[in-house]
């Protein structure tokens, strides 16, 4: 911009010198002719100079309508990721995740249609530990139910991938992405592909023969946590970017109280994320069936077998008692942090939208802890447990929304 102003100033001075020279050296008639010619050239060059950056801006940066379109696209994608997480949770609760023993990107998109095809698929399943140890008396119709549960989850995952990749290609070719958005979109699309591979890597852990173990076959809780964690990261990144494109920033005064509230919100959102992630270890170890009482675990506040494994660190990831205990503590801490955040925010003048996000956050927090306790006391019924898992996504969404409302205005 500085160079443009300088160039215009120089051209103006040159024009004035040229006009003076023509006026002095030639007659009035000729000077008038040259003066008109120079003024026309000056106006033409000035308009071209001013239009050039505008054309460049239109070609490289999306307008507000394009930003709204991309924002809605990313919100739809985040909603589809949420659907995949919820469907994956139901698949885990119904113990359907190990019913499909093969993984083919295209071939398995067509389900069995004849009785012979179903029998062949069932025979594949019968060769693996889950059938031999847990479902040895399963009928073909029962197998079809768990197979379709896992099939639905995998097909939904493919739909999520297409929802990211195909519009991204279209927007890229339209030139709507600036450099920052290109990096984000490439990261999101790459993460979707990684998520699918990680899902199969998780399933493989439940298909392995373990002669030394007589436990119910299940996937590795570590791989389950990685699969869920990556899905949550993808969800949060898509939701944040979509909201940032759709919602204008608030010009809030950068007071000490606001800075403290913003920092408190970030830490609270991190705690909510960690609590949701710990739920993967609870699901992977069936830890919700260990102590079905609240607030005590059995007749104790701290159970005797809390640190039964050696080394001690192993308890936090492989001991069902410790995993449930940790999830309880994290859940209670999240509700306490959100409650504290609500009271701190009352001292800060916030816009209407930010207040709505905060009120929604605390309402969902108390609903979520109620669902968690109900799931525990009722011995993990599928419907309530699935609702509780969905509630963790809703709570995380409210935290991301509040963070987005409090984000800084760039200088």
Image (spheres, rainbow, N blue to C red):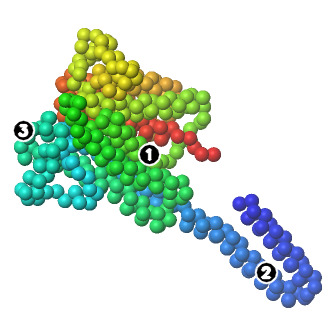
Q: Tell me the mark number nearer the camera, choosing from 2 and 3.
A: 3
Gap in angstroms between the C-alphas marked 2 and 3: 96 Å
Do residues under tags 3 and 1 come within 8 Å of each other at their CB atoms? no
Residue 241 versus residue 42: which sits nearer the camera? 241
Position of residue 208 in the picture relative to residue 223 (left or right): left
Q: CA distance from mark 2 to mark 1?
A: 56 Å
Residue at image x 32%, y 45%?
201
Residue 226 in the image, given as x and y percentages of width and height: 37, 39
Q: Where in the figure is residue 222, as x and y percent of width and height?
A: 35, 35
| Quarter holding residue 353 | top left
| Of residues 318 and 187, the one drawn nearer to the viewer in this rendering | 318
Whether 191 is drawn above or below 261: the answer is below
Q: Is residue 194 visible?
A: yes
Residue 142 image position (x, y, % from top left): 9, 43
Q: Earlier in the sequence, mark 3 or mark 1?
A: 3
The quadrant where residue 20 appears: bottom right
Check disc 1 and report its element: helix, strand or loop.
helix
Q: Residue at x 23, y 51 (%)?
A: 102
**Disc 2 vs disc 1: which is toward the camera?**
1
Mark nearer the N terminus (2 vs 3): 2
User: Does residue 136 appear left or right of residue 248 in this picture?
Assistant: left
Q: Which mark is residue 38?
A: 2
Q: Which residue is mark 1?
A: 237
Q: Name the foreground residue: 289 vs 330.
A: 289
For image coordinates 79% across by 80% down, the residue present is 38
Q: Residue at x 45, y 37 (%)?
A: 402
Q: Look at the image and tell me in which quarter the N terminus lies.
A: bottom right
Q: Secondary structure at mark 3?
A: loop
Q: CA distance from mark 3 to mark 1?
A: 44 Å
The residue indicated by pointer 3 is 137
* Badge 2 vs badge 3, beta-carbon distance below 8 Å: no
Please tell me how crowded label 2 is: few (under 14), some (14-19), or many (20+) other residues with Cα within 10 Å: some
């Amino acid at each position: 911009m500085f160079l443009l102003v300088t160039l215009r100033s120089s051209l103006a001075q040159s024009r004035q010198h040229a006009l003076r020279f023509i006026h002095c050296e030639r007659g009035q008639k000729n000077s008038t002719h040259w003066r008109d010619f120079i003024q026309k050239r000056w106006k033409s060059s000035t308009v071209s100079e001013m239009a050039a950056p505008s054309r460049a801006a239109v070609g490289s940066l999306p307008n507000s309508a394009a930003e709204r379109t991309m924002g809605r696209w990313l919100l739809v994608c985040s909603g589809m990721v949420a659907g995949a997480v919820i469907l994956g949770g139901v698949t885990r609760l119904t113990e359907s995740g190990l019913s499909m023993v093969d993984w083919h990107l295209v071939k398995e998109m067509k389900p069995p249609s004849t009785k012979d095809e179903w029998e062949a698929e069932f025979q594949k399943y019968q060769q693996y530990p889950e059938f031999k140890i847990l479902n040895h008396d399963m009928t073909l119709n029962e197998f079809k139910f768990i197979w379709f549960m896992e099939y639905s989850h995998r097909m939904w995952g493919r739909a999520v991938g297409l929802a990211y990749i195909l519009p991204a290609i279209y927007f890229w070719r339209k030139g709507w992405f600036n450099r920052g958005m290109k990096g984000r979109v490439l990261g999101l699309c790459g993460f979707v592909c990684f998520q699918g591979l990680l899902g199969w890597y998780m399933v493989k852990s439940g298909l392995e023969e373990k002669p030394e173990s007589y436990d119910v076959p299940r996937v590795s809780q570590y791989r389950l946590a990685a699969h869920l964690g990556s899905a949550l990261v993808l969800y949060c990144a898509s939701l944040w970017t979509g909201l940032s494109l759709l919602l204008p920033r608030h010009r809030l005064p950068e007071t000490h109280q606001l800075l403290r509230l913003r920092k408190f919100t970030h830490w609270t959102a991190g705690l909510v994320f960690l609590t949701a992630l710990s739920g993967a270890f609870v699901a992977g170890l069936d830890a919700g069936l260990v102590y079905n009482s609240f607030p005590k675990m059995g007749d104790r506040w701290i159970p005797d077998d809390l640190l039964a494994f050696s080394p001690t660190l192993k308890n936090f990831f492989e001991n069902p008692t410790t995993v449930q205990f940790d999830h309880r503590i994290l859940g209670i801490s999240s509700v306490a942090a959100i409650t504290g955040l609500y009271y701190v925010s009352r001292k800060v003048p916030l816009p209407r939208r930010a207040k709505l996000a905060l009120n929604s956050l605390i309402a969902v927090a108390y609903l979520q802890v109620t669902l968690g306790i109900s799931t525990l006391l009722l011995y993990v019924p599928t419907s309530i447990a699935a609702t509780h898992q969905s509630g963790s996504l809703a709570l995380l969404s409210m935290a991301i929304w509040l963070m987005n409302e409090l984000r800084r205005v760039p200088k």
